[in-house]
Each structure stands twice: as C-alpha cells, then as structure tokens.
Image: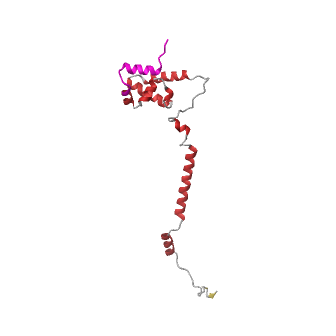
C-alpha cells in the first residue's frame, strides 16, 4: 500500500481547492522555492525546524486545513525518519550555511570588542576629566589668593624677624 508523504498531501489539498502555488506564496509570505521544497518533501532544504513548523502552519491555514493536525503529521514523519542508529542533528539548524564556515559573529570576539570599547571610553573620560584646560586653569588662579612674598621681604612672626 502506498503511503502519501506530507508534501504530496499538502500539494493534493492545495490543488483540490484550486489554489495556485503563487497564491499561497503571496498569501503566506513564504518564498515559492520553500513551498516547492515542502511539497516535494525536501525538508532538508528548509531552515530550522521551528521555521518549518511556522511554514506548515501558515500553509495549512491558508488552504483551509487544521494547522495542528498537519504539524502533528509532520512531527510523526520526522520522528519516524530519525533512527537511533544515526547521529542526531544539532539542536539548531543554521539559517545560512556560510555562517558556519566563517563565523562573523563569534561571541568571544564580540565580548572582547565590547570590553575594549568600554576601556577606551573610560580612558577618554578620565583624560577629559583630569586634563587641565586653559579656562579651568584661569579660574583656579583667580580663586587662589596671592600670598607670594618677595625674596627681599622676610616674613615677620610675632615681631621677631627670621
């Protein structure tokens, strides 16, 4: 007995309702190449599973199916596909393959850059705060009383010359 795949089921239900794939793409905002991959059962060509479930839900709602039933069917198929002998996939599936090859957003790199930025900011603020400015220097001179004595004058303390 032939068992219909989920992709074939979705395509058959869409065609029974006389809805074109372009209409589904426009109504769900899912790219048409992703819809074709879904209908062909090429789940490996789609992004992470959380997105696939969202695509299935949107697709099912748009063509008039009960989304929970279709997602349950998808989960059953995925569970049957995974065998204990095969290594399991990582907990996430990257959106773009090149991110895995060249990690531009390395957490250690971002942390180091943020720490360097904070250190530079603190250094700039310290220099700005402690650096004497001409205006500040002038106001300090005006505030301090002039207590200079000439070398010719000797201070007198209690009528006794030093």
- Residue drawn where x is 50% and y is 36% of the image: 96
Q: Position of residue 39 (x, y in %)?
A: 44, 23
Against 159, residue 107 (above or below) is above
Q: Residue furthest right?
A: 162
Against 111, residue 50 (above or below) is above
Q: Position of residue 73 (x, y in %)?
A: 48, 21
Frontmost residue, 33 versus 74? 33
Image position of 31 (left or right of 131): left
Q: Position of residue 70 (x, y in %)?
A: 45, 22
Q: Quadrant of residue 9?
A: top left
Counting labels gives: 0
Frontmost residue, 151 versus 41? 41
Against 38, residue 150 (above or below) is below
Q: Residue 39 in magenta?
A: no
Frontmost residue, 162 versus 133? 133
Quadrant of the snapshot with the C terminus: bottom right
Q: Position of residue 99 (x, y in %)?
A: 53, 38
- Residue drawn where x is 54% and y is 53% of the image: 118
Image position of 127 (left or right of 18): right
Q: Which residues are the magenta region?
A: 1-22
Q: Residue 20 in magenta?
A: yes
Image position of 132 (left or right of 60): right
């Amino acid at each position: 007995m032939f068992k219909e795949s989920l992709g074939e089921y979705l395509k058959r239900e869409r065609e029974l309702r006389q809805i074109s794939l372009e209409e589904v793409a426009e109504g769900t905002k899912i790219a048409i190449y992703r819809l074709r991959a879904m209908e062909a059962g090429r789940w490996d060509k789609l992004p992470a599973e959380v997105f696939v479930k969202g695509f299935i839900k949107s697709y099912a709602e748009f063509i008039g199916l009960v989304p929970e039933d279709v997602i349950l069917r998808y989960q059953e198929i995925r569970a049957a596909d995974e065998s204990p002998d095969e290594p399991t996939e990582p907990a996430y599936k990257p959106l773009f393959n090149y991110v895995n090859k060249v990690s531009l957003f390395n957490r250690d790199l971002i942390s180091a850059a943020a720490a360097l930025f904070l250190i530079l900011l603190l250094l700039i603020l310290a220099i700005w705060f402690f650096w004497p400015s001409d205006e500040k220097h002038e106001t300090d001179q005006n505030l301090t009383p002039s207590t200079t004595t000439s070398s010719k004058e000797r201070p007198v303390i209690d009528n006794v010359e030093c």
